[in-house]
Image (spheres, rainbow, N blue to C red):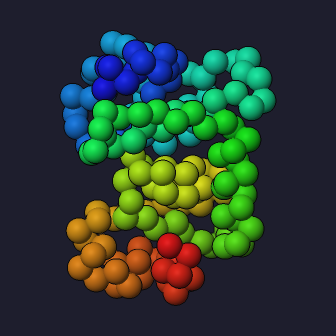
Amino acid sequence: MKQIIDQSRAGLVVVDDTYDPSIPDDCREAASCLTATEVMANGSASAALPADQPHGAPALIQYSSGSTRAPRGVALSDAAVISNIRGIGAVLEPTSTDVVVSWLPVSHDMGLIASLLFSFYWGLPLVFLSPLTFVVKPVARIASARAPHVSAALSAM
């Protein structure tokens, strides 16, 4: 984690504190670091963000898993991320009664952008399922999360 933070020169890192309890401590030594739980409790990470960022500047750097080679970062601009989130919204037409359900980890681009950031942008509740739990009974797991449009959620994924 520290190597990625150093390489990216990150000013803020948001980590999943349930993944590895040691990550937040390592992260806090290298950059401003919040756990996903802290972001949700505070309602925002904006206080830890740099104030003056030009439009189009990198909003985040998403790293590959490193399963086939060393992890590689891809800078995503704020405009690209928002455009993607709005595009998904244009297709799904979310309403205030919708619930986002995902089995993808936030380390995956679809888990991060199409689930976590999408739910933040549209102000929707988010339910994360473990991939194993989802694979066993996908429709039942989504229905148990109280997603009102189960068939739409499955077809959109």
Residue depicted at x 49% and y 57%: 110
x then y, percent, for residue 62? 48, 38
The reply to whether residue 13 is in sight is yes
Which residue extends farthest top? 29
Q: On screen, 20 above or below 7? A: below
107 to the left or right of 19: right
Residue depicted at x 48% and y 16%: 9
- Could you say which is closer to the camera, residue 41 or residue 106? 106
Q: On screen, 86 above or below 13? A: below
x then y, percent, for residue 147? 50, 77
x then y, percent, for residue 53? 72, 21
x then y, percent, for residue 154? 48, 80
Q: On screen, 132 above or below 74? A: below
Total numbered labels: 0
The reply to whether residue 41 is in sight is no
Residue depicted at x 55% and y 58%: 114
Q: On screen, 95 above or below 113? A: below
The quadrant of the picture occupied by the N terminus is top left
Residue depicted at x 52% and y 87%: 151
- Could you say which is closer to the camera, residue 100 or residue 63? 63
Which residue extends farthest right? 55
Residue 6 sits in quarter: top left
Residue 5 sits in quarter: top left
Which residue extends farthest front? 69
